[in-house]
Image (cartoon, rainbow, N blue to C red):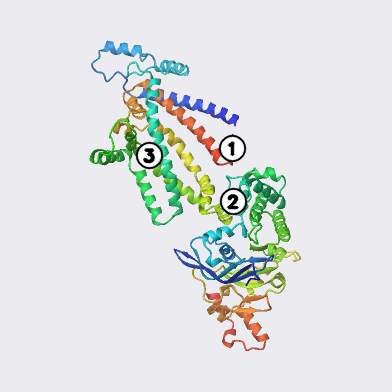
Amino acid sequence: MSEYLVNIEDERLSFFTPAGEVKALNGVTIRVKEGEVLGIVGESGSGKSVTAYSLMGLTAYPGKLIGGQLYFNGHHINDMTEKQMRKMRGNEVSIIFQDPMTSLNPVYTIGNQIREVILLHTDKTKKEAQERAIELLKLVGINEPEKRLKQYPHELSGGMRQRVMIAIALACEPKLLIADEPTTALDVTIQAQILELMIELKEKLGMAIIMITHDLGIVASTCERIAVMYAGNIVEYGTTEDIFYNPKHEYTKGLIRSIPRMDAKEHTRLIPIEGTPVDMLNPPKGCKFASRCEKCMKICLTEMPPVTQFDEIHYTQCWLNQKEEMEKNGQAAPAADSEEAKGGAANE
Amino acid sequence: MLKYIVKRIVIAIVTIFVVATLTFFLMNAVPGGPFQAEKSISAQARANLDAKYGLDKPIFQRYLTYMKDALHGDFSESLKQRGRSVISIITTKFPVSARVGGMAVLLSLIIGIPLGCIAALNRGKALDNVIIVLATCGIAIPSFVICTLLLYFIGAKLQWLPTYGLSSWKHYIMPVISIAVYPTAYITRLMRSSMLDVLGQDYMRTARAKGLSQGVSLFKHALRNAIIPVVTYVGPMLAYTITGSMIVEKIFTIPGLGSEFVSSALNRDYTVIMGTTIFLATLMVLINVLVDIVYTIIDPRIKLK
């Protein structure tokens, strides 16, 4: 257990809304080693951010952890009080949010907002905090740091603000940086700069990164491991090579098919994943992806698929993979379940 | 900043001029006059009075004379209160109203802001509902009802507090509360909704993610952003409140400007009407400038141009 910086075991988390229980996470297991970059990809509402936020104890009301064990850097998150959690946030684990335009408080200077986190978690004096803030701005590639520290967020560009957010996140040299769609709100050239910066800083400071995104391009260029999430489950997990060159789960395959290719012939249409995301209030009984899956079988509609391990790292949660693996290993596949049930799925 | 101040002064002068002109003609358009009610006086005496105060002259000429005198700082004498200049009426009565009104504003801020914050932080819970109901009552119940209830129960039945005049600090309690109820309720509601808005902002999530305690994120990060709508409201409200409430002043027998304002209008005391109106307009303009300056202190994104 201690070899991992982050160890989330079978996390189950629900939002108890007036309309009913929304099962946001249904048994998510994530492990991150020190200095590793894990990408979590998935569509909106698949539970990417919820997973990461729960690690910081930032689960929004009315969300509640109902199962699983969360460990981070030797802490057992489940047992921690809010006070202990506060000591950890911004110190051992930091987060960068999606929209740098709104993530900084408009009425305080950049300097104030950077110094704040330094003064909170270290014994530094105001003067030392100021020096550290200057150092941090230099680190994230902002020119004229002394001048910038006196400026307000609205006086900086989006890319600049995201750099400031990164500076705030790195202020106390965290062990883990959670990047929640850090570049979604930025334009493409700035996106590349910010990603490069993050990876560069990771090399320099040796922290682990959890990169949450719906952009496969970003994970391909930055991550070592990738978890693909769908409707509160990790449907496929593997190294970046596994996911991009040897995807097993139909959802992952679909995601990769839907990326525009540089080498595509003209007028080639992108192939979308048909259907709509699951209604999380009334999720289907079996595999959540079944109703959109081209290769859906009967059993997919009734039972959650087990984990199919391809090698030490690469795994999926898919009945088809399970069946194929069993056949490959010479085991008899569950006969009744092998019938195609596509028609049934389509009618659902 | 200098450009802004110059601009505001020019606008202020124009505003006050327009208010004065409109008031002058409107008040003369209303039937009746300062000496008409006094039936006992003879026609000759009335003509003499009119001549003395220049009321026999054509209206436009009177307007020009008044404005010219006003520009020289001469707001002339009251037509009804013999021998008292309009300026002396305002300078003796305004401080009384301002004291009571100022305390009421202070009270409404001291109670309204925390109450609104508490409601927002407990959104949807029982406490929030209680505060909302109270605030709605505070807005809906007219001040004369509150005055009467206070007078009847606390003043007459329980005899805890004196019922008229302003001779000790005890005398201030009931009038100040009566005036403060409405703004307190209004500020509570404003504060609640703007606090809810701010609490949902991304930078509040950032504050939590930094590891700040709820208190620090609330007082440092939320309050300053959430208070802006309250400042907008408090500006004009302050102007109205410190110039006195006719109802409260009448009920508690307070010699303030509010009742003077109303009785001058009823008595057609032309010079006092003009004087108090111009005074109120000037005060309003000044307070608005003050509010603008306060904005720039609170929110650096606001620049005065």
**Image coords of residue B145 (percent x, y):** 29, 40
Which mark is on residue B180? 3
Check the image and report above or below for A245 versus B5. below
**Image coords of residue B19 (percent x, y):** 44, 26
Classify 10 Å Cα crowding around label 2: few (below 14), some (14-19), many (20 and above).
some
Q: Which chain's residue wears label 2?
A: A
Earlier along the polypeptide chain: callout 1 or callout 3?
Answer: 3
Left or right of residue B270, residue A22 in this image: right
The amino acid type of the residue labelled 3 equals Ala
**Image coords of residue A264 (percent x, y):** 74, 66
Q: Mark 2 points at which residue?
A: A102
**Residue drawn at 44 percent across, 45 percent down:** B113
Question: Cβ–Cβ below 8 Å for labels 1 and 2?
Answer: no
Looking at the rendered image, the quarter that the N terminus of chain B falls into is top right
Q: Which chain's residue wears label 3?
A: B
Left or right of residue A279, residue A319 in this image: right
Classify 10 Å Cα crowding around label 1: few (below 14), some (14-19), many (20 and above).
few
How far is the residue under mark 1 from the one under mark 2? Answer: 20 Å
Looking at the rendered image, the quarter that the C terminus of chain B falls into is top right
How far is the residue under mark 1 from the one under mark 3? Answer: 32 Å
- Name the element at disc 1: loop
Do the residues at pointers 2 and 3 share their chain? no
